[in-house]
Image: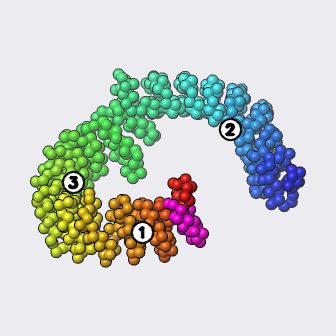
Amino acid sequence: MQGTDIIEALHSEDPAVVREAAFKAGRLKIKEAVPHLVGLVESRNLGIQEAAEFALRKIRGSVTVAALCPLLRSDEAPVRNLAMDILREIGVDDLSALKALLRDEDPDLRIFIADILGSTGTTLAVAPLCEALLHDPEANVRHQAAMSLGNLGFPDAVDSLNIALHDEEWVQFAAVEALTKIRAESSMHALAKGLGSATELVAFMIVEALGELGNIKAVPLLLKRLDSSSVPMRNKIVQAIIKILGGKSLQLFLGKDKSRFRGYLMDALADEDTDIQDAAVRGLAVIGDAAASEAILRLAEHLNPDTDTERLLLMVDALTKIGLTPALERYLFSEEEYPALLAVEVMGRIKGRDVAELFKKAFPSQMRNVQRSIASALAAFGSAQDKDFFIAILEEQSDGEMLKSALYFLSAVVPSPESAGKILTFLDYKYPDVRKAALDACILLKTRDISEKFTQMFHDEDPQQRAVAVKGLLSTDPAGNIDYLRQALSDQSPDVRRVALESLSALKDIPESITPDIMACLHDESAEVRLALIEFLGKVGGSKPIPYLQSALSDPDDWVKIRSVEALGRLKGEDALPQLVELLDDSNPLVAIKVIEALGDIGGDAAFQALLRVMENGDPDLQQAAEDAASKIHATFGGENV
């Protein structure tokens, strides 16, 4: 279809023909079609309108710009908006046509043109926009000119925007926003100077802009305004200063004014704006005192931990930096749970002997949740001086969380072999998580009493006792307890056999003498035992486990097969490719997907060819997985041997 044919088709009665012709005109960039396409922009048929828009964006040029400009006068808002949107993209092709319209009698048209110029991305648009900003009689045009200069972001506009700071309020708003976007240093001086004559509302914007600019030179100017400002303005200035200076710089910058500024920060804590409150908290974290600690605690006390998490963490951090204060002590002994928990959280971060002693003093009279928090916090930083406290917990408390903290402290923080006898009693505790903590503690302590206890438990009739004993014996002395491992691998309880296999990782080297006992578990009647062995083999590395993993591919349990497939993928088990390919037809789709992923990990021509065959499969999930795996092979091997 030639250009004349396309233009003729644009006038067809058939919408489909018109639409296709418009798309062709765009692809071929037929400038002669522009007037006809502009007419189609006003079409009620959205498909035709879409095609016309596409074509005009493709053809571009001064012809298109000139043809679209009249649509800006349209009474139809959708048509006018579409024309503006296209001109924002292509207006740079004929700036002269746009600049001429900035002098049009219609103020609405001048607003539209100012808007469009702000999207052209060229410095050539700065001069006409500055002219409009300073001399247009309509405030809305001047406002839009300022906004567009900000969008362009060129420093050439700063001088004109500085002058506009003395315009009426509506224009000032736009000028402040534009100067903030341009971020030139001269903008900072202009904004600071404009504070003196600005209305309260504009002054708020200027202060916020100075904070956004982040230029440290603005700080002295802002500090001078503090005493003479209203409380709301002062709080806004405080926020800007904190934003500029951040943390440590604040203390260095303020010097003798530190005490005065601290008072302003305290006032800002009462502001309704939470952003200002948070800025005050950041400042007080650096120069706060006991009074600041109490004020922040009162503020934090009313926050919801679930919905105000970030703000609460900010306040906890600030309170931690301020340090231990009388207010924190009072909160620790509070009869209400939340304030006491808040104090424990902060004091646990402060640490130190003073905190430890206060924790121990508060513990007896506090509620259970607070006691749990105290025990957990102290267990993390306590010293030998706190040993009796945790021993008392083991003797007097029944709460699982407190007991776990005590078990951890007495084994990992301050190892206490003399507590081994007491700790051993918790191997039979009613809560499984406490039993596990006790076992971990015993493994860490490794005393003779503990070893003897494990040996005794190994011969117990209860399989759970034997399972714990196996874990303990192999964790405390793996090489010296190989005989127990061999016996455990043939124990009548599958739980004991499983734990024995899970404990193999404690051995640096597996003795050849015990390898047959281990591999015999490939045929164990319990799927969980077989699964434990496969997971162990997958972590061994090298080529030795591969034949055993191959044999597990025919296991009747799907999860054993899946873990074997995954392990072969990680180990690059090329010898297993034929068996893996056979599993692509497994009735369980998860097995097939795991095989596909493994083929992608193993790579090579055979794996790639198998994946290509899967792509012809009708199952979309398998096809997608195969495409991903094939892409991985191609990326890994750079297309070689594929």
Q: Is residue 358 left or right of residue 622?
A: left
The residue lying toward the viewer, choosing from 584 and 131, is: 584
- Residue 138 within the magenta-colored segment of the rendering: no
Q: Residues within 10 Å of mark 3 (few under 14, many from 20)?
A: many
Residue 435 seen anywhere in this rendered image of the structure: no
Q: Is residue 339 left or right of residue 89?
A: left
From what the image shows, is residue 90 above or below residue 608? above
- Give percent across and percent down for residue 331: 26, 44
- Give percent across and percent down for residue 172: 61, 30
Point out the tag, 3 or 1, that comes first from the N-terminus: 3
Q: Quadrant of the C terminus?
A: bottom right
Q: Which residues are magenta?
A: 603-627
The residue shown at (76%, 37%) is 93
Main secondary structure type of the part rendered in magenta: helix
- Give percent across and percent down for residue 344: 26, 47
Q: Amino acid at mark 3?
A: Tyr
Asked if disc 2 and disc 1 are in contact, CB closer than 8 Å, the reply is no
Q: Amino acid at mark 1?
A: Ile
- How many angstroms separate mark 2 from mark 1 (CA)? 56 Å
- Residue 605 within the magenta-colored segment of the rendering: yes
From what the image shows, is residue 528 above or below residue 100? below
Residue to which mark 3 is pinned: 408
Q: Quadrant of the N terminus?
A: bottom right
Residue to which mark 2 is pinned: 119
- How many angstroms separate mark 3 from mark 1 (CA)? 36 Å
